[in-house]
């Protein structure tokens, strides 16, 4: 059964709710996604465009002659991708969901530009944000508390 899941951008201006049937997601490594998001790869889940209820619509721009990408014009968060024509679906960025933890990567796309050094990072040193004292000090100095 589909579960309504919510998400939004970094500044909170754009919000959405969408029914999610399964936990399928994928990583896109194509150069256009890398450039558009500034990330080595981008995690997407595919949904029907008509199913997405936007609390406040993101902006869309033509990212190529065949596709558009959505983003928040205030904070720059990337929301997704859709073809201009021929598909009722769109891809939503997994990390904009309020709880991205249910999604699982099922495949890689854009494998020709995959940066393989970043694929298996298991075993690298792990540092939590609340272990980084300079970051904590800056938050406390400016806001009085640490949001982590
Ligand atoms: Zn925003």
Image (tube, grey):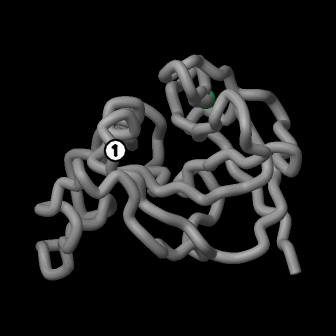
Residue 97: x %, y % from top left: 63, 56
Between 117 and 66, the residue placed more toward the observer is 66
Please give the count of numbered marks on the rendered protein.
Answer: 1
Quarter holding the C terminus is bottom left
Which residue is labeled 1 in the image?
30
Residue 121: x %, y % from top left: 18, 72
Between 13 and 48, the residue placed more toward the observer is 48
Residue 35: x %, y % from top left: 33, 31
With 6 as the anchor, is 30 left or right in this view?
Answer: left
Look at the picture and state if 109 lies above or below 77.
below
Between 74 and 4, the residue placed more toward the observer is 4
Q: Quadrant of residue 126?
A: bottom left
> What's the residue at 59%, 27% (across, down)?
68
Mark 1 residue element = loop
Q: Quadrant of residue 30?
A: top left
With 126 as the anchor, is 130 left or right in this view?
Answer: right
> What's the residue at 80%, 29% (across, down)?
56
- Please state the quadrant of the image where ligand 1 appears: top right
Residue 20: x %, y % from top left: 77, 67
Decide: few, some or many residues near mark 1? Use Cα within 10 Å; few <14, some 14-19, many ≥20: some
> What's the residue at 20%, 79% (across, down)?
122
- Some atom of ligand 1 lies within 8 Å of the CB belonging to the residue at label 1: no
Between 25 and 15, the residue placed more toward the observer is 25
> What's the residue at 52%, 34% (across, down)?
77
With 5 as the anchor, is 74 left or right in this view?
Answer: left
With 145 as the anchor, is 131 left or right in this view?
Answer: left
Q: Quadrant of residue 123?
A: bottom left
């Amino acid at each position: 059964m589909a579960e309504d899941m919510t998400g939004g951008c970094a500044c909170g201006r754009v919000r959405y709710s969408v029914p999610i049937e399964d936990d399928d997601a994928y990583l896109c490594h194509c150069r256009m996604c890398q450039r558009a998001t500034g990330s080595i790869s981008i995690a997407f889940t595919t949904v029907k465009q008509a199913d997405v209820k936007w609390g406040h619509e993101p902006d869309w721009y033509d990212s190529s002659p065949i596709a558009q990408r959505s983003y928040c014009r205030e904070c720059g968060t990337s929301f997704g991708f859709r073809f201009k024509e021929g598909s009722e679906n769109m891809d939503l960025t997994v990390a904009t969901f309020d709880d991205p933890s249910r999604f699982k990567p099922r495949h890689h796309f854009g494998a020709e530009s995959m940066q393989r050094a970043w694929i298996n990072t298991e075993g690298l040193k792990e540092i939590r944000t609340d272990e980084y004292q300079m970051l904590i000090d800056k938050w406390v100095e400016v806001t009085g508390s640490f949001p982590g």
